[in-house]
Image (cartoon, rainbow, N blue to C red):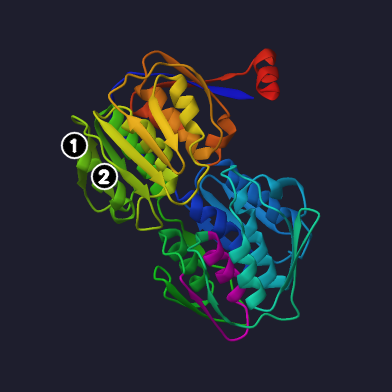
């Protein structure tokens, strides 16, 4: 096990290159199951979730070749191998294996998903969609069993806007008979990315990126080559870092429209944000407090709430952050308090009294974006911050240290001592 150490207070400048979108990659890799010939996916992020999913495809008989940021998936030998345990438990996005395997083989057994513990995140809308298409879905001993004689297109209204359910129903529906209509669909850019891959494979999909998606089932899908869109959450995290401790930072390989809600908040705070075709330039300034409420896309992303909360400790005045998406996404607050932050949590909201100087401390990342929040805090703090739970950060941020070192940060890893490991396990 490792810990991440950051010596804070160093001004950053330079250019940082954004990787492909994690939230696209974890859906695109399972989508390759649906093809009858090889699928090549370019611009993959260097994160542990990609490796885990590639290994899952090999468990069901596929062959994968991962070279740098390119993955080639050979789906020809895949079969409906049950996956009740093991790697499937490591990441929440393993639930996309359900839709892809149901679509291809008309059956699947998938262990209930793992990943970050963010409180109740039910998959009832996924199940509702699968059942509408004609599948029988049962939950037995911690695994979901899906079975269908055939899948037939249906009209499906999602009770809550869900990225996961929207994508999973798309995966199941592209090989179903007839037309499927998903109403109240999520609009995230990652959904358009998945629809683009499926369309390049021969699927017939209209309306991705709107709240109504129409899918006309086809007999089969073929392989193709696809390049993943830039990761808007990684881009947003570096925009926050640049605003907090940057002299002048250029963020390269980004789609500015995808981070517009964050750009607007940063400008409101007094940060200089200048946009080009695929670049954003950030220069910090005198920071004013703001209130933020997370919403489904195109609103402020819940995935940026935690790093943004760290950043708000630097702004003069009181700020309110409300997370309407996940009610358990304030686990980083106790860790920020260890560093001297003045924050109170009431229900789904956090009140940040800003203008406080953070101090380096020993803290623990409880989930992926909480880890990002602690990195932001460590870069702002006086002294050295030690972050454990680094495996969470590695799930979503590839080459994080290299990118920050390239901007002038002092950040490094060390092995945990046996005593530190024991203390973590007993905590």
Q: Residue at x 41, y 57 (%)?
A: 296
Residue 332 placement, left or right of 209: right
Q: Residue at x 41, y 75 (%)?
A: 207
Mark 1 surroundings: few (<14), some (14-19) or many (≥20) residues within 10 A: some
Query: In what element is the residue under mark 1?
Result: loop
Mark found first going from the N terminus, 1 or 2 = 2
Q: Residue at x 64, y 57 (%)?
A: 95
Where residue 129 sits in the image (x, y, percent)? 60, 72
Image location of residue 34, percent across then percent down: 63, 69
Can you identify the residue that label 2 sits on?
265
Question: Residue 338 vs residue 106: left or right?
Answer: left
Q: Are marks 1 and 2 in contact (CB under 8 Å)?
A: no
Classify residue 243 by image quadrant.
top left
Question: Can residue 19 be seen?
Answer: no
Residue identifier under label 1: 270
Magenta residue check for 176: yes
Question: Residue 319: x, y in percent?
Answer: 30, 36
Of the pair 27 and 201, the residue shown nearer to us: 27
Q: Is residue 202 magenta?
A: no
Viewer-side residue, 246 vs 377: 377
Q: Is residue 150 above or below residue 163?
A: below
The residue carrying pointer 2 sits among few (fewer than 14), some (14 to 19) or many (20 or more) residues within 10 Å by Cα, namely some
Q: Which residues are magenta?
A: 164-184
Q: Secondary structure at mark 2?
A: helix
- Total number of numbered labels? 2
């Amino acid at each position: 096990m490792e810990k991440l150490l950051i010596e804070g207070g160093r001004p950053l400048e330079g250019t940082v290159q954004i990787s492909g979108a994690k939230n696209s990659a974890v859906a695109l890799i399972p989508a390759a199951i649906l093809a009858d010939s090889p699928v090549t996916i370019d611009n993959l992020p260097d994160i542990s979730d990609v490796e885990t999913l590639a290994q899952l495809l090999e468990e069901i008989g596929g062959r994968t070749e991962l070279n740098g940021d390119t993955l080639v998936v050979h789906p020809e030998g895949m079969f409906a191998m049950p996956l009740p345990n093991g790697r499937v438990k490591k990441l929440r996005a393993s639930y996309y294996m359900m839709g892809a395997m149901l679509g291809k083989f008309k059956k699947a057994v998938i262990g209930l998903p793992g990943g970050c513990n963010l409180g109740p995140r039910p998959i009832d809308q996924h199940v509702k969609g699968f059942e509408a298409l004609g599948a029988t879905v049962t939950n037995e001993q911690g695994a979901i069993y899906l079975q269908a004689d055939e899948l037939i297109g249906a009209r499906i209204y999602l009770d809550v806007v869900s990225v996961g359910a929207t994508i999973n129903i798309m995966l199941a529906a592209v090989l179903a008979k007839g037309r499927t209509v998903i109403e109240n669909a999520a609009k995230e850019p990652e959904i358009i990315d998945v629809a683009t891959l499926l369309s390049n494979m021969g699927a017939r999909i209209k309306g991705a990126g709107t709240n109504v998606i129409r899918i006309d089932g086809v007999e089969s899908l073929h392989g193709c080559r696809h390049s993943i869109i830039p990761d808007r959450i990684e881009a947003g995290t570096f925009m926050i870092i640049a605003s907090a401790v940057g002299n002048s930072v250029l963020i390269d390989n980004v789609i500015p429209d995808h981070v517009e809600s964050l750009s607007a908040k940063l400008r409101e705070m007094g940060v200089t944000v200048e946009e080009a075709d695929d670049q954003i330039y950030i220069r910090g300034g005198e920071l004013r407090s703001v209130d933020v409420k997370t919403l489904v896309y195109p609103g402020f992303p819940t995935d940026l709430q935690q790093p943004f909360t760290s950043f708000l400790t630097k702004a003069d005045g009181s700020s309110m952050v409300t997370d309407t998406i996940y009610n358990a996404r304030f686990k980083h607050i106790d860790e920020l308090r260890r560093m001297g932050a003045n924050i109170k949590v009431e229900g789904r909201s956090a009140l940040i009294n800003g203008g406080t100087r953070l101090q380096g401390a020993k803290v623990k990342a409880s989930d992926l974006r909480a880890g990002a929040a602690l990195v932001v805090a460590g870069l702002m703090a006086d002294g050295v911050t030690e972050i454990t739970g680094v495996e969470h950060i590695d799930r979503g941020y590839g080459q994080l240290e290299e990118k920050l070192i390239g901007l002038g940060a002092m950040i490094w890893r060390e092995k945990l001592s046996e005593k530190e490991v024991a203390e973590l396990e007993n905590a």
